[in-house]
Amino acid sequence: MPQTPMPTDPLIQIRDLQTHFFTDDGVVKAVDGVDLDIHANRTLCILGESGCGKSIMARSILRIVDAPGRIVEGSILYRNAHGGSVDLATARPGSRQLREIRGQDIAMIFQEPMSSLGPIQKIGRQITETIMLHRKVTKAEAREIAIDLLDRVGIPRPAERFEAYPFELSGGMRQRAMIAMALSCQPRLLIADEPTTALDVTTQAQILDLIAELKEELQMGVMLITHDLGVVAEVAEEVAVMYMGKVVERGDVFSIFEAPQHPYTRALLASVPRMGQGRRDRLPAIRGMVPHPLARPAGCAFRARCDHAMPGICDARQPALKPVGRTEAACFLHHKEALHD
Ligand code: SF4
């Protein structure tokens, strides 16, 4: 697990972010009061089961949440290269400022490559156009950079693939081409949403290495969304665990793995196979299911699945994130006194 010194000013400072979806059946609080910082040259992994709000939180940063969702509260302060700051949560959608930040300063890698790649333009042309838009290079230099990037994301015969259309590539190769395109503009912040889930382990390792290399080289901040604890252990410096739209625990990667405090984090870590474990040993699964988003329970949202739930306490109020041990966790096991705040 890598460790880089923590810089002082965060690149992104998220405070009380709330992104809700207004459906005919009710309001879904997909992101429900998230506080997070992302620093330059650091990788923050967002961990959680599907539907916990991690992807919507990432899309909120870029202001690309689809209707009927919208940010209803909170701020996303982005510190630009000149030291100024912009609140992305309140920036006018479609504004030039937002478009420039999105295209140049912050890049996102999606699970689905065709959400970034144009279907009727050759891969090479799409990447060189991005490079030339953001870097002072000639067309020939941009071509060289693009082919090198295609090579670095593990595309065989990159010069040949440079001339291919997206539909001529396999799904995995399209995914890698999209990653090459996102990295080609040398963003200050890279948001990667399950970027390697569909790829084989060798390519996955290659891409995670490339992201780590560029992070150091460009002092790039990385927010990586994943449900894969192996990936977290490999690349994260900081970890935030989300459950039903809230961060329930956060801390540096060592503390999260060695001394997790929230019952949900402990259950997630316990459900991963370990070296030396007998083949007949059954892995403990987290019992129950994530509640329906429209049927959010009162109090702690994890209580129906929690072995430590305390009647009269955990169903009375929502626990807030507070320091405990080496991390911060939102759990009354550690903060019963918070009930009397
Ligand atoms: Fe379990 Fe209560 Fe802690 Fe929620 S607040 S995780 S129900 S002990």
Image: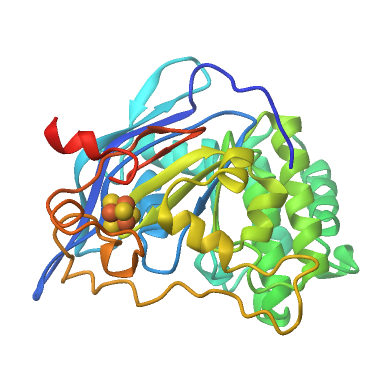
Instruction: Please state, as top left, top right, bottom left or bottom right, where the C terminus lies in the image.
Output: top left
Instruction: Please state, as top left, top right, bottom left or bottom right, where the N terminus lies in the image.
Output: top right
182 to 186, vertically: above or below: below
Q: Is residue 274 left or right of residue 22?
A: right
158 to 253, vertically: above or below: below
Residue situated furthest bottom in the rendering: 280
Q: Position of residue 268 (x, y in %)?
A: 52, 62
Q: Is residue 330 left or right of residue 217?
A: left
Q: Position of residue 42 (x, y in %)?
A: 62, 34
Snapshot quadrant of residue 178: bottom right
Residue placed most toward the observer, 244 or 335:
335
273 to 146, vertically: above or below: below
Ligand 1, seen in the image, is in the quarter at bottom left
Residue placed most toward the observer, 101 or 337:
337
Residue placed most toward the observer, 132 or 78:
78
Q: Please report the residue visible at 81 percent of the width from the left and 46 percent of the height from the top.
A: 145
Residue 81 appears in the figure: yes
Q: Is residue 33 left or right of residue 209?
A: left
Residue 129 appears in the figure: no
Snapshot quadrant of residue 122: bottom right
Snapshot quadrant of residue 282: bottom right
Q: How many marks?
A: 0
